[in-house]
Image (cartoon, rainbow, N blue to C red):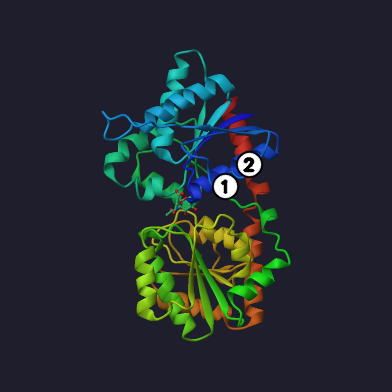
C-alpha cells in the first residue's frame, strides 16, 4: 500500500507511535509518506520505502496566526495526487483529521478518492477536546473519518462520553518494537556509571507538563531515598523543569537527581534503571510506561485513564490513586526490597510488554487499511 502519515513530529507519544508505525510498515514493503512540519524525531533511518514531505508555513505579515491547517490541507492534496496515495492515516484529531477531511473533499471534486483513518491519542480528547470551542470540529472530524481508532478502551469511552459520536471506534493499542530492547553488555557499564554504589535507580520520562505530575516523581523519590540508597534520572524537558529543580534544592536531593534532557534513544537508560515512575493526572495509554516494561523495568503509576490496561497491578508494577505519593513510594520500596522481588517484577513487566509487540499490532492496522481502501 501507499500510505500517507500525518502526525506531530515532536517528542510526544502520538508522534512516536505514528513514526514507529510508519517505519514498521515500510519494513514490510509498504510505501510510507510522512507529511509533517518537521522531520519526526524518531524518523532516524534510511529506507527506500520512506518519504518525507515538509509542510512549510511561511510568515506573512498580514496574519498574526499563520493558517497551518490550510497549508497542511494543500500539502495533503498535493502529495495524494502526485504520489498516488491509497490512504491517509492521521494521528491526533485536530487539526489533522479536519485537514484530511477538507483534502478528501477537494480531491473528490477532481475525481480522486482518498479514505482517511483518524487515530485518537488522548490529549486531543481529554485536554484539548474538553475545551468546548473545539468540540464541533472534533466531533465532525471523528464522525466523517473513514475509520477511527483509539489507543485504549479508556480513551474510546472518554470520546463517546464527551462528544456526540455516531460511529464505531476501534481500539488498537499502542505498541513497542521489542527487538529494539534486546539489552547488551554495555547496560551494566551504564548502570555502574549512573549508580556507582549500587544504588537503586529510578527513572521518569516525559515532557514535564502539569498533566504528568512530575512534582510527585520528586516527592516519591524523596520518600524512597530516605529508606534505601537511590538515585533518580529525569529524562525529557518541559515547562515544569525549573520548578522541579527548585523542589530538589528544597528537599536537598540535587546530588541524587540527574536531569538528562531530551534523550532520543531512551532504551538503554530504561534498561539500566530498576523502576519507572509515572504519576500522571490523566493518561490515555502511557507509552512511556510500556517502553520501560519492554526494557524489563517495572512501573509505579497512577490508575488513571488507560494506564491499567498497560501496567498490571502486582505483576508489572503497582497502581495507586492520583496524588497518593505515599502509596507510590511504599509500592516502590516493595519492589526494590530485595533482588528476588525485583527480578519477579522485571519478568512480569516484560511478559506484559510482549502483548504489545509491534508484530501483534501491525496486522490490525493493515487489516483496517485494506478494509477502508476496498
Ligand atoms: O502525553 C503526552 O505528553 C503527549 C501525548 C501526545 O499526544 O503525544 O501523549 C498521548 O498519546 C500517547 C500515545 O498514544 C499516549 O501514550 C499518552 O498516554 C497520551 N497522553 C495523555 O493522554 C496525557
Q: Quadrant of the N terminus?
A: top right
Q: Residues within 10 Å of mark 1 (few under 14, many from 20)?
A: some
Q: Residue at 56% of width from left, 50% of height from top?
A: 174
Foreground pick, 56 / 207: 56
Tell me which corner region of the image, top left, top right, bottom left or bottom right, holds residue 297: bottom right
Foreground pick, 250 / 169: 250
Residue 323 spot, x, y in % from top left: 37, 70
Foreground pick, 143 / 6: 6
Residue 359 spot, x, y in % from top left: 68, 47
Secondary structure beneath dot 1 equals: loop
Q: Residue at 36% of width from left, 65% of height from top?
A: 242
Secondary structure beneath dot 2 equals: helix
Residue carrying label 2: 23
16 over 320 or under it: above or below: above
Residue carrying label 1: 42
Q: Are marks 1 and 2 in contact (CB under 8 Å)?
A: yes
Amino acid at each position: 500500500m501507499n500510505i500517507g502519515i500525518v502526525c506531530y513530529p515532536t517528542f510526544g507519544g502520538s508522534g512516536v507511535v505514528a513514526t514507529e508505525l510508519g517505519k514498521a510498515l515500510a519494513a514490510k514493503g509498504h510505501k510510507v509518506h510522512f507529511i509533517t512540519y518537521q522531520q519526526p524525531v524518531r524518523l532516524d533511518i534510511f529506507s527506500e520505502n520512506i518519504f518525507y514531505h515538509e509542510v512549510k508555513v511561511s510568515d506573512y505579515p498580514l496574519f498574526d496566526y499563520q493558517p497551518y491547517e490550510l497549508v497542511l490541507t494543500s500539502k495533503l492534496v498535493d502529495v495524494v495526487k502526485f504520489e498516488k496515495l491509497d490512504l491517509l492515516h492521521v494521528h491526533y484529531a485536530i487539526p489533522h483529521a479536519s485537514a484530511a477531511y477538507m483534502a478528501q473533499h477537494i480531491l473528490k471534486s477532481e475525481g480522486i478518492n482518498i479514505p482517511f483513518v483518524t487515530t485518537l491519542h488522548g490529549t486531543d480528547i481529554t485536554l484539548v477536546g474538553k475545551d468546548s470551542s473545539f468540540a464541533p470540529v472534533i466531533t465532525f472530524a471523528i464522525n466523517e473519518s473513514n475509520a477511527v481508532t483509539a489507543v485504549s478502551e479508556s480513551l474510546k469511552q472518554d470520546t463517546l462520553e464527551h462528544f456526540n459520536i455516531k460511529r464505531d471506534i476501534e481500539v488498537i493499542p499502542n505498541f513497542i518494537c521489542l527487538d529494539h530492547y534486546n539489552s547488551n553488555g554495555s547496560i551494566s557499564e551504564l548502570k555502574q556509571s549512573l549508580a556507582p554504589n549500587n544504588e537503586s535507580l529510578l527513572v521518569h520520562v516525559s515532557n514535564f507538563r502539569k498533566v504528568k505530575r512530575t512534582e510527585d516523581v520528586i516527592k516519591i523519590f524523596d520518600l524512597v531515598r530516605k529508606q534505601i540508597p537511590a538515585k533518580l534520572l529525569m529524562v525529557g524537558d518541559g515547562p515544569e523543569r525549573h520548578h522541579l529543580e527548585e523542589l530538589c534544592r528544597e528537599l536537598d536531593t540535587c546530588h541524587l537527581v540527574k536531569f538528562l534532557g531530551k534523550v532520543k534513544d531512551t532504551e538503554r537508560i530504561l534498561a539500566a534503571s530498576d523502576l519507572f515512575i509515572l504519576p500522571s493526572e490523566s493518561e490515555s495509554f502511557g507509552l512511556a510506561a510500556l517502553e520501560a516494561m519492554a526494557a524489563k523495568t517495572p512501573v509505579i503509576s497512577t490508575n488513571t485513564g488507560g494506564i491499567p490496561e498497560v501496567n498490571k497491578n502486582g505483576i508489572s508494577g503497582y497502581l495507586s490513586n492520583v496524588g497518593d505519593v505515599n502509596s507510590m513510594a511504599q509500592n516502590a520500596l516493595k519492589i526494590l526490597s530485595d533482588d528476588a522481588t525485583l527480578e519477579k517484577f522485571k519478568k512480569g513487566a516484560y511478559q506484559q510488554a510482549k502483548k504489545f509487540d509491534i508484530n501483534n499490532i501491525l496486522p490490525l492496522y493493515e487489516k483496517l487499511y485494506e478494509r477502508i481502501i476496498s
